[in-house]
Amino acid sequence: MGVRRKMKDVPHARNRALVYSCALVGLTAYALPRLPELKPGLGGTFTVLWILVTALALSANIYFLVGADKERSRMLEELEILPQPEEPPRQMLRRRSLG
């Protein structure tokens, strides 16, 4: 059972994601030839981790640009999967002395 999070509307969010994606592609194009070779050791480990983090950031921006979050929300609403109403706050239990 997933928890639905509330996301506020951020103005120009798609434009910002597009700019970030373009900047990330440019950074990758600039840095990729300058990264250490993929050899066992510290340099190769750094290169692999750098490529993985870059791929993760780029895929997150593309996921947002494609609108997969909105499509998923729309599908859940069509299936009438609504979030459960929030439980009322629990009152604090008072400890009673046994003595």
Image (cartoon, rainbow, N blue to C red):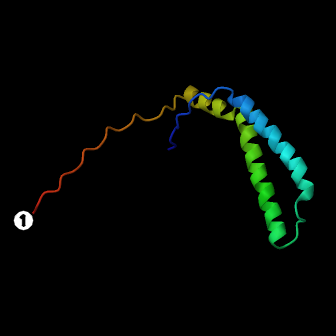
Given the image, on which type of amino acid does mark 1 rest? Gly
| Left or right: residue 37 compared with residue 45 | right
Image point (69%, 27%), residue name: 12
For disc 1, the neighbor class at 10 Å (few under 14, some 14 to 19, many from 20) is: few
| Left or right: residue 5 compared with residue 91 | right
| Residue 71 position within the rendered picture, expressed as x and y whole percent measured from the top left | 66, 30
Helix, strand or loop for disc 1: loop
Farthest residue, direction right = 33
| Residue 95 position within the rendered picture, expressed as x and y whole percent measured from the top left | 17, 56
Instruction: State whether residue 80 is above or below residue 36.
Output: above
State the residue in front, 56 or 72: 56
Rendering quarter of residue 72: top right
Count of numbered badges drawn on the protein: 1
Image point (39%, 36%), residue name: 86
| Residue 96 position within the rendered picture, expressed as x and y whole percent measured from the top left | 13, 57
Rendering quarter of residue 23: top right
| Residue 61 position within the rendered picture, expressed as x and y whole percent measured from the top left | 73, 39
Badge 1 is on which residue? 99
Image point (71%, 43%), residue name: 60
